[in-house]
Each structure stands twice: as structure tokens, then as C-alpha cells.
Amino acid sequence: MKKIIILNLLVFASCKTELKVSVKQAEISCGQCKFDLDSEDGCNLAVKFNEKAYFVDGFNIDDFGDAHDVNSGFCNVIRKGAIEGVIKDGRFIASAIELSK
């Protein structure tokens, strides 16, 4: 299944370690279960865009329902959605996450 992911990245020169991100279509799931991130223990929310995954600060993995639900939980499926936030120190600090229907 091929889908085109449209990305809008805005860079602000105010700080070299921050990158403001507004993405219309990103993958959202469990970083450990679905994106093979291993720098944290347990199950944690993560986003993936531009072929790179980041753990999320600002939202919890259970904020969108039971993370272990067989049909819709982030530990079992990768969902799509729009995200806004800042990449700082290798993490995605989310100001908005809206799941696609």
C-alpha cells in the first residue's frame, strides 16, 4: 500500500537544537512495539515522519484509548494523524496530535 505523505517543516533559527514541525500526515504508535525504539522501558507514544521515529512528550500513549486494544491500540496498530510540535534533544514535544478517522 503506497501513500504519499505530505510534510511541512518549518525551521526557526532561534535555537539550533529545536525544529518546529507541522506535519499533515504522520504515523503514530508505540515507540517500542511498532517503531523499534529502545531508549525507554515500557510502552510509550511515538511519532514517525521522514522515516525517523521520536518519542513524544506532551501526550500519553493512553490519551487516545487503551494502548493494548487489539483493534486500535498503539501497541498493536500504527495509526495516521496530523501532528504539530518541536523536535528538541531527539524528542518530539507535541503541541497537537489529531488522529485520522
Image: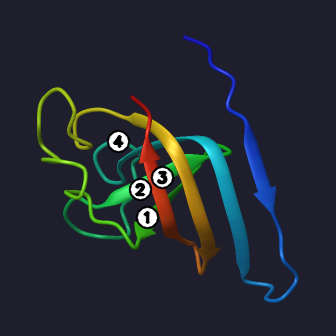
Badge 3 amino acid: Val
Q: Is residue 32 above or below residue 19?
A: above
Q: Position of residue 85 (x, y in %)?
A: 59, 67
Tag 2–tag 1 contact (CB < 8 Å):
yes
Q: Position of residue 31 (x, y in %)?
A: 36, 54
- Which quadrant holds residue 87? bottom right
Badge 1 amino acid: Phe
Mark on residue 55? Answer: 1
Tag 2–tag 3 contact (CB < 8 Å):
yes
Residue bearing mark 3: 47
Q: Whole-Å distance between the Cαs marked 2 and 3?
A: 4 Å
Q: 81 or 1: nearer the eye? A: 81
Badge 2: residue crowd in 10 Å (few <14, some 14–19, many ≥20) = many
Residue bearing mark 2: 46
Q: Position of residue 82 (x, y in %)?
A: 54, 45
Q: Whole-Å distance between the Cαs marked 4 and 3?
A: 10 Å
